[in-house]
Amino acid sequence: MSLLEVSALGVSTRAGAALVRDVSFAIDTEQRLGLIGESGSGKSITSLAIMGLLPAGTAATGSVLLGGTQVVGAREPALVRVRGRVASVVFQEPLTALDPLMRLGKQLAEPLARHQRLRGRGLRRAVLDALTEVCLPEPERIARSYPHEISGGERQRVAIALALACRPQLLIADEPTTALDVTVQDEVLGLLDRLVAERSMAMLFVTHNLAVVSRMTDRVLVLRAGEVVEYGTVRGVLGAPKHPYTRSLVASAREFDAALEVS
Ligand SMILES: Nc1ncnc2c1ncn2[C@@H]1O[C@H](COP(=O)(O)OP(=O)(O)O)[C@@H](O)[C@H]1O
Ligand SMILES: [Mg+2]
C-alpha cells in the first residue's frame, strides 16, 4: 500500500457545487508529486481534504488513505493520530499555522514534547535544535519572540519546523513560498528540498509556478476546475504537454520568462 492513496476524491459545498471531482493519485515513501493549476483550480481544497481539514460547509466523497487510515468521513480522534505523524502541511501564509499570542518556542515545544516525550532542559534543547535545523541563525531570539516580531521568511521557517516536529513521512507544502520575497523564496525552497531528502520524506508540493514544480518534484498532476487534466513525469508533462490547458500553462510560463529576459 502507498503512503497516500487518493481514489475518486470529490469535494462539494453543502449547496451542491463541485469544487473537486474524481481526483485519484498515489504517493509512495520518498516520492515527490507536484500539484499544479491556476488559482481556484482546487489545489488547496485537495490538500485540505487529504488532511481532513476541509472548510466548514464543504464535504468529501471517495477515499483518502493516509498511512492506511481512511480520512474521508473519519472522526477527529482518528485524524489527530495521523496529523503530524503521517503527514503535515505547510501553508502559503505561515501565520495560519502560528498562534499570535504564544511565544514561538512554546508553540514548538508542544509537539516536540508529545512526540519525543521530552521535558525541561532536554525539551529546551530540542526546540533550539529544531529552529537551527531550519537555518534560523538566532534560535534563542526566535524562541522568545511572538510571530509578529519576526520576518515573513523567519515565520515560514518556524512553520516548517512545526510541521516537521513529529517527524511526518509526508509533507504537504501548499504554495509555501508564494507570500515571500524572491530571494527568501529561493532559500526556503532549498531548505525544503534538503530536509525532505535528508529525512527520506515524501512530498506533495502545490504551486502555480512551473519552474518551482520542476525544481522540487519528479511527477506532476495538473488540475483544472477541480479535475485532473494531465499526470506524468515533470519532464513528460511540461516538456510535451498533451492537454490544451497544460499547453497554455507552459506557453504562458515561457512568455513570462521571455518578458523577464528582455526587461
Ligand atoms: N470554504 C470554501 N467554501 C466554498 N468554496 C470554497 C471554499 N474554499 C475554496 N472554495 C472554492 O473552491 C475552489 C478551489 O479553491 P482552492 O482549492 O482554494 O483553489 P487553489 O488552491 O487551486 O487556488 C474555488 O472555486 C474556491 O472559490
Ligand atoms: Mg490554494
Image (cartoon, rainbow, N blue to C red):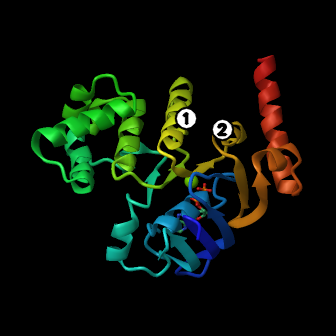
The quarter of the displayed image where residue 209 is located: top right
Outermost residue toward the left in this view = 120
- 28 vs 77, left or right, is right
- 143 vs 71, left or right, is left
Rendered location of residue 236, percent (x, y): 83, 48
For residue 65, above or below residue 111: below
Read off the residue under disc 1. 189
Q: Residue at x 76, y 17 (%)?
A: 263
Element under label 1? helix
- Pick whichever, 152 or 71, lies toward us: 71
For residue 185, above or below residue 17: above
> What amino acid is found at the position of numbered circle 1 in the picture?
Leu
Q: Residue at x 21, y 51 (%)?
A: 113
For residue 55, above or below residue 29: below
Residue 18 seen in the current view? no
> What amino acid is found at the position of numbered circle 2 in the picture?
Val
| Residues at circles 2 and 1 in contact by the CB criterion of under 8 Å | yes
Q: Residue at x 51, y 47 (%)?
A: 200
Q: Residue at x 47, y 49 (%)?
A: 91
- Which label is found at residue 78? none
Rendered location of residue 131, percent (x, y): 32, 34
Read off the residue under disc 2. 212
- Pick whichever, 141 or 96, lies toward us: 141
Residue 241 seen in the current view? yes
Asked if disc 1 is less than 8 Å from ligand 2, the answer is: no
Rendered location of residue 59, percent (x, y): 51, 77
